[in-house]
Amino acid sequence: MAAYFHSVTLEKDKCMGCTNCIKRCPTEAIRVREGKAKIIDERCIDCGECIRVCHNHAKRALTDPLEIIKAYPYPVALPAPTLYSQFSHKFKVDQIIQGLLNLGFFRVWEVARGAEIATQVLVKYLENHALPKPVISAACPAVLRLIQVRYPELLEHVIPIESPMEISARLAKKELEEEGYPVEQVGVFFISPCAAKVTSVKNPLGVKKSQVDGVIAISDIYGPLLAQLASTASGSIQPRASGAGIGWAVIGGESRLLPFNQTLSVDGIANVVRVLDDIAMGKLKEVDFIEGLACMGGCVGGPLTIENSYLSKTRIQNLSKKYGMSYPEVAPEFACSEFFWTEKIEPCSVLVLDEDLALAMQKLETLDEIHKALPGLDCGSCGAPTCRALAEDIVRGLAVEIDCIFKLREKVTDLAERMVELSSKLPPSIGKPR
Amino acid sequence: MMDDNKQFKPLKLHFTVEQGDFIRAGEASSKIKKVLSQLGFPGPLIRRVAIAAYEAEMNIVIHSWGGELEAEIGPEHVKIVARDRGPGIPDIALAMEEGYSTAPDKVREMGFGAGMGLPNIQNCATEFIIESGEGKGTVLRILIAVKE
Ligand code: SF4
Ligand code: SF4
């Protein structure tokens, strides 16, 4: 596999090796080795669970610093709708947009508008293509990656259209180009609530190359932007997105706009796993559409946000009301098919034990035997999330049985008993007759 | 017909399925699915096996007095055998009709037993044999070829 980029990384100095994170990872991508957590890159879907759960703040997402925008004469900000929820309701959306311009952006292209366009593209797509039910939203890149890694058989359920971020990036560049700016001098920067979006820019799924030139964390831009807001007046800019697009920031925001009878909105990666398990067994066929978001509450709960996610949710709901749910049609000059995926997503085989089926079967049998012999406490002391995961690591040659402290203790006890036994043996010169 | 996966020691999995245990229903099929993913079988096959195994498992939970599910995994095909102790199916042809169900109302209220189980299995299977008769219990033999 080619070097795979993903965004979540570990700051070694801060990691205490506490094993809190290993249990929460939905793809069992973390092990603790030599007192430090280690992420198995190919398994990580950048859901951010480990960022959230780490008390030592040792997990972080690789994003770009705000200064990156200076590398382009015409930098464009693409604020995720979640950004609007980070500030008190006294600050209006147009003020936030103005604040971004004050920070040095040449233009702001609202991803909330991109979301409205994505909704229309999606409806168009489904008019002409039959997908197996339930169809699954591709909006959350962490969920998309989860499907690729754990549920490749469900890839055909996923609606293959670009994300609001990609759509916005493309349209922003197009607009500036039409206005006569040299497109190579236009840099487009997504203001992100999550690490998964960084990965979907550096390592895109469904498109060959992302149109986004950099990703800035909401948590990084929050301070500078807040400082701007105090001195920014409202009223000079007319936001383009309506409450419909802004609503995409919370769970259910996408489903609510779609013409389906039965939709299911699931937030939190563990809940998404449960629902995907059910779909994989042929359940939930009566459901038309499933919107699965990795973060609790939706993107407002993203790991790179600042504000309490429940408060953010309320703010987004209020904004949705304020800006209304009617939004303009996609401009007729765009063919919706422009935004369909061009690349097929291939299943990712990180969970496969061996490429050779016969060997894989042997390994599976050994894995079962090893697993049966382990204590089954899933204590995590060995650095793997469960006894089963340790057994798997042993079979893959990445761990040994005595990594399990109970197994080690058995061995030590055994050894101690033998030593006692040996120590009772006396030399023949002073011992009993043999 | 259902020949063995030649020259290959197939992997066998065995599960006990309890009558009426809706809480654990699906665990066996879920494990079978996981094993197939770890062995690297193609997605469409995994899906067919998962659905067939799940429906067979649910049949035991809903209609029988308990039974067992076996999976035999080889390079050519996956074989599922669902064996139950139970009242048996008096009219197999009728049971194979979509929408026909003998599930009690209580079970239907839970969203199960819509009469799609056997037809669903049929759709996923390459070969499908039912052995049953009134008072005899039921055996479902499902073979799903890796290459369709
Ligand atoms: S980001 Fe998610 S998938 Fe990646 S290591 Fe952390 S918890 Fe695991
Ligand atoms: S729910 Fe939103 S913020 Fe969270 S990972 Fe998915 S896209 Fe990112």
Image (cartoon, coloured by chain):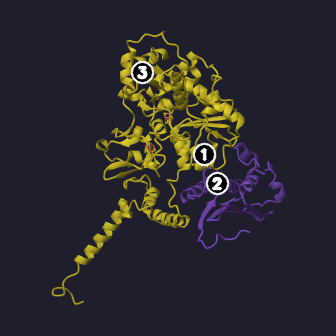
The residue wearing badge 3 is: A105
Residue furthest toward the left? A429
**Which quadrant, please, contains the C terminus of chain A?**
bottom left
Q: Who is closer to the viewer here, A118 or A176?
A: A176
Instruction: Determine the colour of chain A.
Output: yellow
- Is residue A111 in view from this perspective? no
Which residue is depicted at the point 61% across and 20% down? A325
Q: In the image, residue A175 lies at what x, y percent?
A: 53, 22
The residue wearing badge 1 is: A155
Q: In the image, residue A433 lies at what x, y percent?
A: 22, 90
In the image, taking residue A355 as reference, residue A288 lies left or right, namely right
The residue wearing badge 2 is: B50
In the image, taking residue A22 as reference, residue A314 lies left or right, namely right
Instruction: Determine the colour of chain B.
Output: purple
Real-space Cα distance between discs 2 and 1? 15 Å
Chain name for mark 2: B
The answer as to whether callout 2 falls within 8 Å of ligand 1 is no
Real-space Cα distance between discs 2 and 3? 51 Å
Using the rendered image, report if marks 2 and 3 lie on a common chain: no
Dot placed on the residue nearer the N-terminal end, 3 or 1: 3
Figure check: A357 above or below A246:
below
Q: Who is closer to the viewer here, A151 or A287?
A: A151
